[in-house]
């Protein structure tokens, strides 16, 4: 409680005392008792009450979060400068003080009935550049400029919230929304749109002595028709994405199959090349072996006969040779067991065929 309030409380008590004294004086006078002492007391009390009333009427205490506008009958209707926080003096009964808050205030416009300053739906309906309707919830945080309190009082009095902040905010919001398409307003360019709203609203309010602290775009919703179309579009996009995913999966499967086939073909080619190289190496080895055998035969003419005889099965007892072939050497013993171990087989030359003359 400040001094001005204490003084006013004291004045009230004094006047109550004056009333009580007058009642006592009247009662004593009606009974014929002396009232001189009480009369003097009552007069002193009245004088003190009047003096304190004048003093209390001239003292005004301004809170730190307020500024006082002095409505004066002596200064052209209003003092040009507001009263600062603390104890101030005004002319009693000739001047009155209207305090105005300079602290932050919030004005909310919402679709929810219990959130805003107005009961019911107080959201802003706005049309976008492409003709779509969107519903906006917003809050404006503002404060009265301490240096412009007197002008705010002159222009708006207590109506600055309803008659200045609210309509200016709604108009600025609608103007900004009309510059953007619905998709931009709710997604890619929302921050840019909010900046335009904030700058324009700050300018409008400052022209009327109000400082914009912050502008909050709380929510943006679509009309039911557009919301349904957006939902259908999203469903279609999701289906398209799903189809695209299936196509990509098929492409990947086909690519994987192609790579497997390519790998199998490469393996076959590599294996064929290996087989061909192996055959070439084998052929080269056979060629070298034949060349060595040929050289050995040329160096040893009887080698073939020796090898031929070694290949003959051991149970062969008679060998027929052409009659013009010389005997190479006696065959080894062909019989085993009960045969004569000293018997030498006889090599019988084949008869030479006799040429015959053709019959005429």
Image (tube, rainbow, N blue to C red):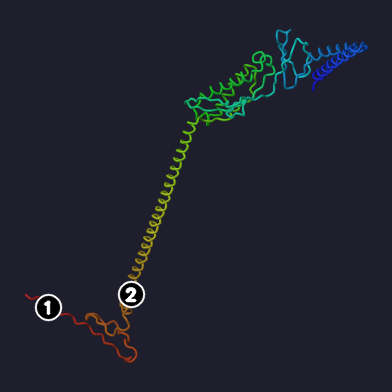
Give the total of numbered labels. 2
The residue located at (54%, 23%) in the rendering is 174
Q: Nearer the viewer, residue 72 or 176?
A: 72
Where disc 1 sits, the SS reads loop
The quadrant where residue 192 appears: top right
Q: Position of residue 337 (x, y in %)?
A: 34, 90
First of labels 1, 2 by sequence position: 2
Q: Which of 130 and 343 is in front in this view?
A: 130
Q: Which of 329 and 179 is in front in this view?
A: 179
Q: Name the residue under label 1.
A: 356
The residue located at (57%, 22%) in the rendering is 170
Where disc 2 sits, the SS reads loop
In the rendered structure, the answer to whether residue 305 lies left or right of residue 115 reads left
Tag 1 near tag 2, CB within 8 Å: no
Q: Which image quarter holds the C terminus?
A: bottom left
In the rendered structure, the answer to whether residue 185 lies left or right of residue 153 reads left
Q: Position of residue 317 (x, y in %)?
A: 28, 85
Q: Which residue lies furthest to the front in this view?
A: 31
Q: Where is residue 42 in the image (x, y as percent from the top left)?
A: 88, 12
Q: Nearer the viewer, residue 251 or 33?
A: 33
Tell me if residue 38 comes above or below residue 332 in the rendering: above
Dot 1: few (<14), some (14–19), or many (≥20) neighbours within 10 Å? few
Q: Where is residue 176 in the image (x, y as percent from the top left)?
A: 54, 23
Q: Mark 2 points at which residue?
A: 300
Distance from disc 1 to disc 2, alpha carbons, whole Å, reads 39 Å
């Amino acid at each position: 409680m400040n001094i001005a309030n204490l003084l006013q409380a004291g004045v009230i008590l004094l006047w109550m005392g004056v009333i009580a004294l007058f009642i006592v004086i009247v009662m004593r006078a009606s009974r014929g008792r002396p009232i001189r002492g009480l009369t003097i007391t009552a007069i002193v009390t009245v004088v003190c009450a009047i003096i304190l009333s004048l003093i209390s009427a001239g003292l005004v205490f301004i809170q730190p979060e307020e500024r006082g506008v002095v409505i004066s009958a002596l200064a052209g209707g209003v003092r040009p400068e507001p009263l600062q926080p603390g104890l101030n003096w005004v002319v009693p009964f000739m001047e009155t003080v209207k305090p105005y808050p300079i602290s932050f205030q919030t004005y909310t416009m919402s679709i929810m009935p219990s959130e805003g300053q107005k009961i019911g739906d107080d959201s802003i309906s706005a049309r976008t550049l492409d003709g779509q309707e969107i519903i906006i919830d917003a809050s404006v945080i503002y404060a009265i400029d301490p240096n412009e309190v007197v002008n705010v009082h002159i222009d708006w009095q207590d109506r600055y919230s309803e008659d200045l902040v609210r309509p200016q905010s709604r108009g600025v919001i609608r103007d900004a929304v009309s510059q953007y398409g619905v998709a931009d307003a709710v997604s890619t360019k929302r921050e840019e749109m909010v900046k335009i709203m904030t700058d324009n609203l700050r300018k409008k309010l400052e022209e009327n002595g109000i400082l914009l602290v912050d502008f909050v775009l709380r929510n943006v919703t679509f009309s039911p028709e557009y919301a349904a179309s957006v939902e259908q579009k999203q469903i279609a996009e999701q289906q398209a994405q799903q189809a695209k995913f299936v196509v990509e999966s098929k492409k990947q499967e086909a690519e994987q199959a192609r790579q497997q086939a390519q790998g199998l073909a490469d393996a076959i080619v590599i294996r064929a090349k290996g087989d061909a190289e192996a055959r070439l190496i084998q052929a080269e080895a056979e060629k070298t072996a034949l060349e060595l055998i040929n050289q050995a035969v040329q160096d040893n003419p009887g080698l073939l006969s020796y090898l031929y005889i070694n290949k003959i099965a051991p149970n062969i007892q008679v060998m027929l040779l052409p009659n013009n072939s010389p005997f190479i050497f006696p065959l080894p013993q062909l019989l085993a067991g009960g045969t004569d171990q000293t018997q030498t087989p006889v090599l019988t030359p084949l008869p030479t065929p006799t040429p015959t003359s053709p019959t005429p």
